[in-house]
Image (tube, rainbow, N blue to C red):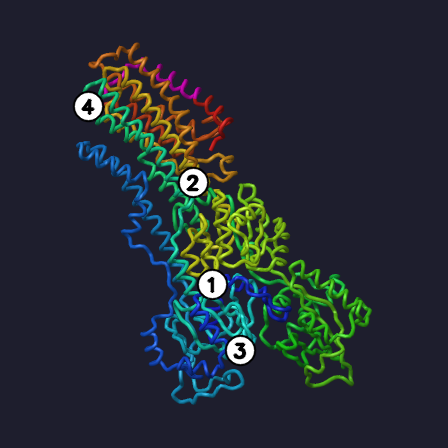
Amino acid sequence: MKNALRSFFDNFLRNRHMLRHFERWPTLLGSKPPVTGSAAMPRDVAHALRAAAHADPGDLLVTLNSATHGLPVEKAEALRKRLGANDVHHERPLPWWTHLWQCFRNPFNLLLTVLALISFFTEDMKATVVIGSMVVLSTVLRFLQESRSNDAADRLRAMVSNTATVLRPDPAGQPLPIGDGGFDTSCSGSLRIEVPMSELVPGDVVALSAGDMIPADCRVLVAKDLFVSQSALTGESMPMEKFALGQGGSIASPLEYDNLAFLGTNVVSGTALAVVVHTGARTFFGALAQRVTAVAKGTTAFQAGINRVSWVLIRFMLVMAPLVLLINGFTKGDWWEAALFALSIAVGLTPEMLPMIVTATLAKGAVVMSRRKVIVKRLEAIHNFGAMDVLCTDKTGTLTQDRIVLERHTNAWGEAADHVLRLAYLNSHHQTGLKNLLDKAVLAHADVEHTATLKAEYRKVDEIPFDFTRRRMSVVVANGGETHLLICKGALEETLSVCTHVERGDAVLPLDAELLARIEAVTADLNQQGLRVVAVASRELHAGERKAAYGVGDETGLTLAGYVAFLDPPKESTAPALRALAAHGVAVKVLTGDNELVTRKVCADVGLDAGTIVLGNHVEHLSDAGLRDIVERRQVFAKLTPAHKERIVRALHDNGHVVGFMGDGINDAPALRAADIGISVDSAVDVAKESADIILLEKSLMVLEEGVLEGRRTFANMLKYIKMTASSNFGNVFSVLVASAFLPFLPMLPLHLLVQNLLYDISQIAIPFDNVDEEFLTRPQRWNPDDLGRFMVFFGPISSIFDIATYTVMWFVFAANAPEHQTLFQSGWFIEGLLSQTLIVHLIRTRRIPFLQSRAAWPLLGMGAAIVAVGIWLPMGPLAHYFKLQALPLGYFPWLVGILLGYMALTQMVKGWYARRYGWQ
């Protein structure tokens, strides 16, 4: 194998979790289960693939205008110009202006834009600049962060540049005819060259070896121990053996043909020559990719929630602003001044910083997650991470380690036996054929010290290679004496067929019907535990039986030593991660294409109660209502197709759950699209990464738990701003309504409202960096517009009580009770209103006692203190006249302290009652 291929193999295994699938390993282990993960493909594509599978190799080459030595370069280029490149349809990146528009369009940005336009036409340029700045900042910040994340995802796709080894005619050679089912493997008459996969065309003959990605949909012409992982298409965990010989009879899905290989799959072991049948969009992978990327992603939990919250606040504004206009117009008589004041109220009721706070908070979460090896493609996915209460995940590589290990070595009675491991090691070590995953697992499991002893004691005499008729292989070794030892390893049934005795300790017992039944019971129990069982047998060959060369006929009269059993073991981090997710209110459901026996074993090992496993054929026949019911009662689903996975995700979503789905194959793409948060890995197929909202650079459930917590912190800080601002603004407007009805002047000028609102919003810039109480992280969080409306009604009027108290103090104590003293009145309420708004941050950000049991982060404390200082300085400083304010007497400030302390005490009391009655989100 060329060094370039070896390098690609290493990189491929490191970056693409496709070697993880071995549930079909080999027919060596028994009968093949049917393919359960195939997805539908266009009928013409399926028909052409079936025809290729059944065709004689020579006839197929003629049909494709090809030959045994491959296509000439000129013919390949002509075909490529006519048919196009061998590229799969990907989701096209949005033009920057479309992406920018999507970042802008939300109810709040649109509302703020309208208010900015009204302010512009009423010549209120200060309001226009402030409101417009908020819209621009939030839109640009979101645009830049999402663009960076998408660029990172694109760089992942470009990390591996895939090539294929293609045969081209050798001008000096002669093409060879098709022989018994294939080529002469010397490939005389042809040259092997590396070309980009995108340059392949139908009729190209490609050479395949371990680690190669199948570059197109191909018909196998020559195969030697060829095993292909089709997990990216089917979800099957075991590689599928591929042959050159055609199949007869009817097969339901082209994916079940064992002489076809498909784009997007990869060679686990073996070598082959294959002819390209379909390329690009006409491949199975390409057809499914087109179908998946054509479906728009639905409205997520974040989008639905923020839209509902937005409309709650907008409805409040649409009610309150006209009321202020009418009251001031009728009581003051100046309708133009009343209209400007009503516009200021509309601006004051609208949390104009909300788009920027939301975007900044999400962006901060995305930056934190990037440090934990997570790429956030869509910022809103951070919220969905925190709101997620159900995580659907595949099994292999997520719960398990993505590799096969030798789990047990036992005698025929199922008792641990080191002797069996020694025999298995000698068999795997001395065979010269391609070592499959099972051989590698045996070699890796054996103790280093003992293996060195075994290598020194035994030398190889001969071997009887594996073939797929016998489904076993043998080696003959000698330990220095005159006795040879034949060691056979293979499928249970085929190995038992050449055994006459069974070994137990030092005793050797004849293999009779009773022992055979016992053996079948023991191996059936191992299979029920999800283990793959291989039999190990031996025979001593004495002086009269020794040979220089051995053959299949010598595999007789063997003694069964026991079994070696294999498993893809769970990761050490899986069980604690599942416990952590459960503790944080996230239920994990396993959706896999694997069979139920292996799935149950893995679930038991990681502490997940599998209960009754629902199989794909049962899901197939369930109505939507029946499926919505069963997904609530079952945790594990096996032998699923891509359509089944998508239906399960949608059923959970329809039941009101925020659903995450983690997958990496083309067969996972529909479910990734259907989920509120699609999670993929850097090694996933491109279509899966395009469908995902988040890409993990390491496939670990511990990373997911960290993401859940970060999502909840992010949402908590967004919710703080919305609740604090909405309730505070509502209280201010309520206070304005009361004052407008009884005062002979405006309680606060439009300029004062705008400056007060701006200063308060600036104090909230540090919200994304605030601390979050631990109890908020223990359960999923989501938008609750009803709770927001109730919260505004309960907490807004509390501030109005103390605003009215301030009115009373200013009117009666400081005699600010006539239009000529309105500036003093307005200055007093300006300071009290700003300080109470700033103080509410600390009261409402936690259910606990503020400053004592829960303290805000230093950036928020510092920003709040700075705004309090600025708010007091403005009326007391040299700029007071510019802002139409005036200095307050020192006697005002003790009253201010008393009012603020009363506000804190009452708010804390109401907060405790409210939390007990309605809960505290």
Residue under the image location 33 percent in, 26 percent down: 868
Q: Is residue 400 visible?
A: no
Q: Nearer the viewer, residue 564 or 91?
A: 91
- Kindly report the distance in space between the C-alpha atoms of the residues bearing marks 4 and 2: 44 Å
Q: Residue type at mark 1: give it.
A: Ala
Bounds of the magenta segment: 880-906
Q: Residue type at mark 3: give it.
A: Gly
Q: Is residue 634 above or below residue 500?
A: above
| Image spot of residue 294 (x, y percent) | 38, 58
Q: Which of the labelled discs sits on residue 772, or is there none?
A: none
Residue labelled with disc 1? 40
Question: Which circle's residue, 1 or 4, is located before the other in the chain?
Answer: 1
Number of numbered discs: 4
Q: Is residue 92 visible?
A: yes
Left or right of residue 830: residue 89? right
Q: Quadrant of residue 205?
A: bottom left
Residue labelled with disc 4? 335
Q: Which of the labelled discs sits on residue 246, or is there none?
A: 3
